[in-house]
Structures are given as structure tokens and as C-alpha cells.
Image: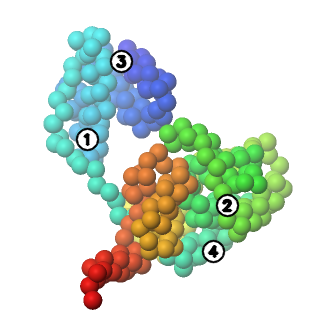
Amino acid sequence: MLSDAVNRYIELYRSMGFKYKVQAYMLHSFAAFAESRSERFIQTDSVLEWAKSAPSIRQRYDRLLTVRRLACSLNAENECHQVPPLDVFGHAPKRRRTCHIFTQDEIDRLLQTAAQLTSRRSIQPVTFKAVLSLIVSTGLRVSEALKLQLSDITEEGLVIRATKFQKSRLVPLHATASYGLQQYISIRKRIKTACAAVFISKRGTAIPYSTINQTFLHLSRSAGLRPGPGLGGCRIQDLRHTFAVRSLEQCVGDRKAVARHMTALSTYLGHAHVSDTYWYLQATPKLLNDIARAAEALHLEGKP
């Protein structure tokens, strides 16, 4: 069956270290679609019909590209698998989404709203305030914060284990962040649970990504930071972008100092290359003012 070939293909990618979650979901979806038509091999017509059911050009292109790669692999073993053309839906270039850089007032409102979550006899309010505070003060990926174990909290900082790119790193904490985390841990230890995750749900289990994302949307709307459902706005990932931008704003306006800072920031955020860190940066009034001053100084240099 086609689903068996899909499973082998997914396992191959995962054996090489890829998480392959989104692609696996799409391939399983396509296999179910094809098998509902009693097809044992990939057929171009079925691929295109399945792909075009996606709501956007970008998603159609991603669907087609993902299944086409599978088709190329299977076609090398059996020519009964057809390889669909690549340019049916055109090319949908990736566009960088404009990130929301939070002000200190917005962060305060978000955390205050989290602390006021209504949950009787539950650790939920203090948990969500603590996890959001940690992301704000360290720029951790959301998944990294949720996967933290109690044993990962050390005197030197947080041990972030085998996350993106299968890298582990030590994340030192500012004294205030360390104090806030310890305050949360003292409350968290009162909950009777065998779960070793740092941040736990009201049931005493590790918090799923979907739960914290939905909670963030609720909190940001309640705090007046985001419009109603179905409308765009700030995302929880923007807290990481905010950390990167605000930390750069604190850097002395010196090219060598900025270069050193970017290298340190890239390591702290767990990036494989410093170019990955540039993706997190966004112009702010303060940064543009610093750039304007540096450009003016360069222009006037050597002139009487």
C-alpha cells in the first residue's frame, strides 16, 4: 500500500535527524486521499487534485513539493509512480512576516493578565506567568521552555538539551530571572505529580505546545494586544524576536561591539549560524536612530 511506502520514507528522514512533522502530516494526508481512490501508486492527477484543495498558493506549492520529493524517491524504485511537474501552481516565494516587537508596557500587561487567569485551586495562573516571563527574559524557543526538566535548572543556568539542529547549550540567567524561576519552582513543588517537567498544567502534566499557544492568544486579546479571532496580531514567537531586538538596542554603538554582541546572541539563542540571528532582528526607532548617528559620523569623518 502507498501508506507503507510513506511510512518508510518518513522513517528514513527521521533516521537522519530530521523531525519531519509537518511533512509527515501532509504525506499521510495524501496517502489517505490516494488510497480512498484505490490507488497503489502516485498518480499526477491525484497529487494535483489533493494539492489544490489547500486554501492558499503557498500551501498548494508546499503540498506539491512535499509529495513530488516522495514521488522522485519512489519512482527510482518503481516507474509506476508518476512524478508531477513542479511549476503547476507557480512559485510562491517565502515572505518574512513582520514581527511584533513588544514594549515594556505591553509585556507588563501580558504578564498581569496571565496572573489573573481564573482557575480555582490551580497552578495555572502562576505557571503561565512564569513560562512567559522566562521566554521574555531569555529568548528561549517556546518548545525549549516547555521541554525543560527540573534537573535542567543548575547554578550556572538552564541546560537546553538537543533541541533544534540537535544541539545542546547552557543558557545563563540574569539574577532577576533566576529568582523569579526559583519562586515558581517553590510553588510548583507543592503539586503532587510524577512529572519532571518544569512547567506543568493543572492536571500535573507537561504543557502541550497547542495549549500555551491558545492561552497566549487568549491573554493577548484580554490585554488588548491583539484583535479578535480570525484577525492577525502578535504571536508568542514574537517574544523571542523582542528579546533579540531589545538586547541589540542595549549594545554600544560601535561596530566591533555589535559584531561581538551578535556572535554572543547567536550562541545564546542556539543558532547554527549568525545569519539565522539576523532573521530575528527588526528595525525599531532606537536602532534607526543609532544607525543614523553612525552614518552621520561616518559622513563627517575627516571633514573640518
Q: Mark 3 packing: few (<14 Cα in 10 Å), some, or many (20+)?
A: some
N-term mark: 4 or 1: 1
Q: Position of 184 compared to 147: left or right?
A: right
Residue 14: where, in percent of width, then height? 48, 27
Label drawn at residue 202: none
Residue 241 visible within the image: no
Q: Residues within 10 Å of mark 1 (few under 14, many from 20)?
A: many
Residue with the mark numbered 4: 112
| Sooner in the amino-acid sequence: mark 3 or mark 1 | 3
Q: Which residue type carries mark 4? A: Gln
Q: Position of residue 280 (x, y in %)?
A: 42, 59
Q: Nearer the viewer, mark 2 or mark 1?
A: 2
- Which label was assigned to residue 2? 3
Residue 173 is marked as 2
Which secondary structure, mark 2?
A: loop
Please give the label number shown on residue 60.
1
Point out the tag, 2 or 3, that comes first from the N-terminus. Answer: 3
Q: Amino acid at mark 2?
A: Leu
Pointers 3 and 1 in contact (C-beta within 8 Å): no
Q: Are marks 2 and 4 in contact (CB under 8 Å)?
A: no
Q: CA distance from mark 2 to mark 3?
A: 49 Å
Type of amino acid under label 1: Arg
Q: In 3D space, how far apart are the residues under numbered discs 4 and 3 (Cα atoms)?
A: 51 Å
Residue at 26% in and 46% down: 58
Residue nearest the observer in this picture, 213 or 261: 261
CB within 8 Å, label 2 to label 1:
no
